[in-house]
Image (spheres, rainbow, N blue to C red):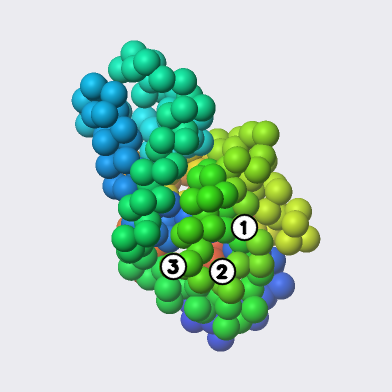
Amino acid sequence: MTSSSPAIGTLTAEGSSLQAVLLDMDGTLVDTEGFWWDAESEAFAELGHVLKDEWREVVVGGPMTRSAGFLIEATRADITIEELTVLLNGKFVERLRRGVPLVPGAQRLLAELSLHGMPTALVSASHRTVVDEMLVSLGSEHFEITVAGDELTRTKPHPDPYLTAARRLGADPARCAVVEDTVTGVASAEAAGCRVVAVPSVAPIEPAVGRTVVESLEEVNLAFLRSVVLMARQGVS
């Protein structure tokens, strides 16, 4: 479903509704989901295993421990989750240092949120080393706070990452707009009580009550995010 939104100037009631914008990283702002799969494929090739393409949808968007555990079990590779996590993070960061492609519309959206002083958080299931490396390309000045997956006891699909981000920004989760690209991330944000805009990357995401699905981040701007929160608060699905 593709939605349109009114211009900022028509949103007089919305300005006090949206309190913060919480953004996923991989696949949402940066086109790195392929980077992860390439890193996983390379790591397992070194271990003597070939990953099946259908496993890609299983591991996308989740915490490293879940993805690593699934792939170890599926391949019966002789490696621990802890060892594989270190290996994958290393291979992924190597790829990041060659250049990180931003998703179309990402730079514009970040600049607009900064221009209007909208409190913004980066909320990722990736580890802190990866998040910090990515901030070089995204621009750390665009985010009041960042939340990394290895800093929490429970990460996506649990609500903890988005609850943590909202709390640290002093925002009501119900008045936060989340932009996500995976089912796992959407589940996390919705469990936290946030309003979700889904921009599917690797796997499809179905529309649902309280959830807006768009085809591209280029359809998302501040007015759109304000309207999503306002409609939810008014009980409009």
Q: Residue beneath label 1, please?
A: 146
The residues tagged by marks 1 and 2 sit, at their Cα atoms, a distance apart of 9 Å
Q: Residue at x 54, y 45 (%)?
A: 127
* Quadrant of the image occupied by residue 228: bottom right
Q: Looking at the rendered structure, which numbered label has been put on residue 10?
A: none
Circle 1 SS class: strand
- Residue at 56% across / 69% down in the picture? 140
The residue where tag 3 is placed is: 137
- Tell me what residue is drawn at x 42 percent, y 43 percent: 90
The residue to which callout 2 is attached is 140
Q: SS at mark 3? A: helix
Sequence order check: which comes first, mark 1 or mark 3? 3
Query: Does the image show residue 73?
Result: yes
Q: Which quadrant holds residue 76?
A: top left
| Residue 141: quarter of image | bottom right
The reply to whether callout 1 and callout 2 are in contact (CB within 8 Å) is: yes
